[in-house]
Amino acid sequence: MEPLAARIRPQTLDEVVGQEHLVGEGKPLRVAVEKKHLFSFILWGPPGTGKTTIARIYARAQGAELFELSAVSAGKDDIRKIISKESYDRDKLLIRQKVLFLDEIHRFNKAQQDFLLPYVESGELTLIGATTENPSFEVIAPLLSRCRVFVLEPLSEEALHAIVKRTKLKANKDAFDWLLGYASGDARKVLGMLEGALSLYGKVTVETLNKALESPHLRYDKKGEEHYDTISACIKSMRASQPDAAIYYLARMVEAGEDPLFIARRMVIFASEDIGLAQPTALVVANEVFRACETIGYPECAINLAHGVAYLAGAKKDRSAYDALRSAQEDVRTFGNLPVPKKLRNPVTKLMKELDYGEGYEKYDKESYLPDKLKKKKYLK
């Protein structure tokens, strides 16, 4: 009963298909495995591109004891249990290094990441994080600074074709083409659809693949990639000002029992990120939808969600505030903490006054308040 994806999962780097920039000859993860170099890192890439597989191969090659957790359901207690567990190889009379593979690390909140940090700092745990989200925004800076980040790419059609061949399942060219088009670089999608069509209908054709796609046996998984695909489709439909499509994807999430606060939280983000200054009341509406979902819950709060989605989809869009923030963040990372102009500094002591802190400040000054190096920069356009 083991899933097809698990049965054909690569056991060595030589069996890994794709990601040659990481696991090919002379590439960083290949070298780390060959030289048994143990360090913390984060694998960032789309679903079904080999993050879990690479993490397992790496840990096994180091002779380490691998602990696997999903940040969706794990917490501080799970970390404590790993730390307290004895990792002693009695046959080899040595203490084994502990490697923690934390899937969906972006789902760990700041407090949880802060709790994990000292164990990674001390080397008590070697961390391998996996995420589909940009770790620059989702992982706290102290933890991120102690990890290398490796970016995984969507698998090419050639790579997916090689993975399908490995299953030794028979399918005609049209079915192969259908699978490759559906997969969008995700091997798990390909293998899941293959297995679904075969188990439900006994053969793999375009017709059985389409039937399997609509089958309740392959329904929405609140912890899987469908969870992200559907909220993404809803957000993108609102961004394109298509309320009918947005409400359809909302309905799919509601029918699947998706957490209404997860949906509402994304709406609050959308209100500032995509609508922003064009219609500031959108943030008020989105926040009220979130509060309504907290207060009422299912099934009635689905109506509040639909109200909010329809409103946000119909609102004018303006990403200038969001773009300004990201541009300013990039300058902060590039230039560090540039000196604040003296006239903007608070002269709270005699010495500060003698050093001209606050000198020349005028309430309605037209001169740029930005640091000297960025005087001519315009973030908000």
Image (spheres, grey):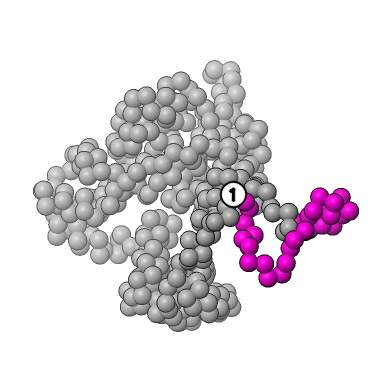
Q: Residue at x 52, y 27 (%)?
A: 38
Residue 62 vs 168, above or below: the answer is above
| Residue type, numbered disc 1 | Lys
Q: Quadrant of residue 222?
A: bottom left
Q: Indicate whether residue 365 is drawn in magenta.
A: yes
Alpha-carbon neighbours of circle 1 within 10 Å: few (<14), some, or many (≥20)?
few
Residue 233 placement (x, y as % from top left): 35, 65
The residue drawn where x is 59% and y is 49% is 373
Q: Position of residue 346 (x, y in %)?
A: 78, 58
On whether residue 151 falls in the magenta region, the answer is no
227 lies above or below 334: below
- Residue at 29 percent across and 44 percent down: it is 155
One can see residue 298 in this view: no
Residue at (22, 44) in percent of width and height: 157
Question: In the rendered image, is residue 25 in sight?
Answer: yes
- SS majority, magenta: loop
Pointer 1 residue: 373
Counting the numbered discs, the total is 1
Q: Decide which of 281, 7 is in the foreground and name it.
A: 281
- Which region shows up in magenta? 345-372
